[in-house]
Image (cartoon, grey):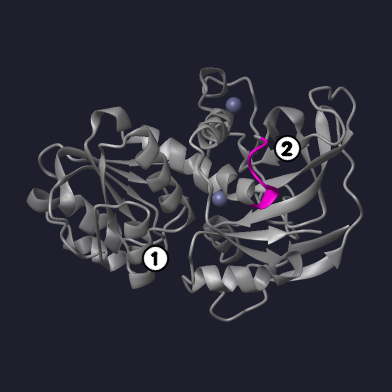
Amino acid sequence: MKAMILEKICDLAECAEPLRLEDLPDPVPGGGEILVRVSACGVCHTELDEIEGRTPPPLLPVVPGHQVVGRVEKAGPGARRFRNGDRVGVGWIHSACGRCDYCTSGLENLCADFRATGRDVNGGYAELMTVPESHAFPIPGIFTDVEAAPLLCAGAIGYRSMALTRISGIKKLGLTGFGASGHLVLKMVRHRFPDMEVFVFARSPGEREFALELGAVWAGDTINTSPEKLDAIIDTTPVWKPVVEALRNLAPGGRLVINAIRKEDSDKDYLLNIDYAEHLWMEKEIKSVANVAGSDIAGFLELAAEVPIRPETEVYPLEDANRALVELKQRKIRGAKVLKLD
Ligand SMILES: [Zn+2]
Ligand SMILES: [Zn+2]
């Protein structure tokens, strides 16, 4: 099979082609697994964290990609959930132990044996991949393959982030950073909580304009002060400045939810700007989002179909994965980037 593989950790500012097109042997589904023929795979910021070594794959080479849509090609021994030809999606969660206290209480995203698609095992930047059938999700019929791909990570983790804000109790929500996940959260909020006001902080004018088009009541730069204090803010940026600035814009008792697997160190010194009285006092709190549970993916897909939420996408052929990654790094973003396979 054709696959784009990551062979070594590198800085994308110095290597424009971190992945290499390779012909690999077709994977074989093990017990309880299915073999999926991939038709689309979303490009996620987490791939940059893998390539640049902030959350490095434990073994190289690896095939990245964890927003995978495809069709079941073959079932491994004991796998009975799907029939050949069924359309399924695979997200960041490839497997977890299934037995620990976290797994048995719906928090498999926190399991010590959490294994991530496209980092700990081969993912979807390839023609074929395998996954436990328990972590493959049927895709609602109203979505095309390309539309469904970003729902599996950006959407599912946006859904988890929203829940962690204690969404039903809030009136004013902030989003700092407005890429793939942020724009899906805004669409979700507009439909589920039409009275909620959403304030967007984004560095690029294009992203701010896009946020207003999608129904944000206000859009400003990351360092701007919002016209009102906010009950909760979701941060989807890779850096620290927006965290500090978001804390300043929170209302008393407000919660900042950081949806990032890793933060870059480039502006870490900005944290020294934290003033306890201004940024943290008055019972403000910070909560991070880690991974996704299967219930986030299933729950979000159901909600996305009901609304419906269709992501804005930019499509690239598999061979152009490097270009998609570099453009993501350079923040040339409008919606979600998706690799399409023939
Ligand atoms: Zn992702
Ligand atoms: Zn577990």
Q: Residues within 10 Å of mark 1 (few under 14, many from 20)?
A: few
Look at the numbered disc 1 and give the secondary structure of its residue.
loop
Q: Is residue 7 magenta?
A: no
Q: Residue furthest bottom?
A: 14
The disc, 1 or 2, on the residue closer to the chain's N-terminal end is 2
Tell which of 102 and 305 is nearer to you: 305
> For disc 2, does the CB lie below 8 Å from ligand 1?
no
Residue appearing at x 19%, y 64% in the figure: 224
Image quarter in which the N terminus is found: bottom right
Quote the CA–CA distance across marks 1 and 2: 37 Å
Tell which of 145 and 56 is nearer to you: 145
Label 1 is placed on what type of residue?
A: Asp
Could you say which disc has been placed on residue 88 in the image? 2
Label 2 is placed on what type of residue?
A: Val
Look at the numbered disc 2 and give the secondary structure of its residue.
strand
Could you say which disc has been placed on residue 265 in the image? 1
Q: Position of residue 171 (x, y in %)?
A: 21, 36
Q: Position of residue 42 (x, y in %)?
A: 63, 55
The secondary structure that most of the magenta stretch takes on is: loop
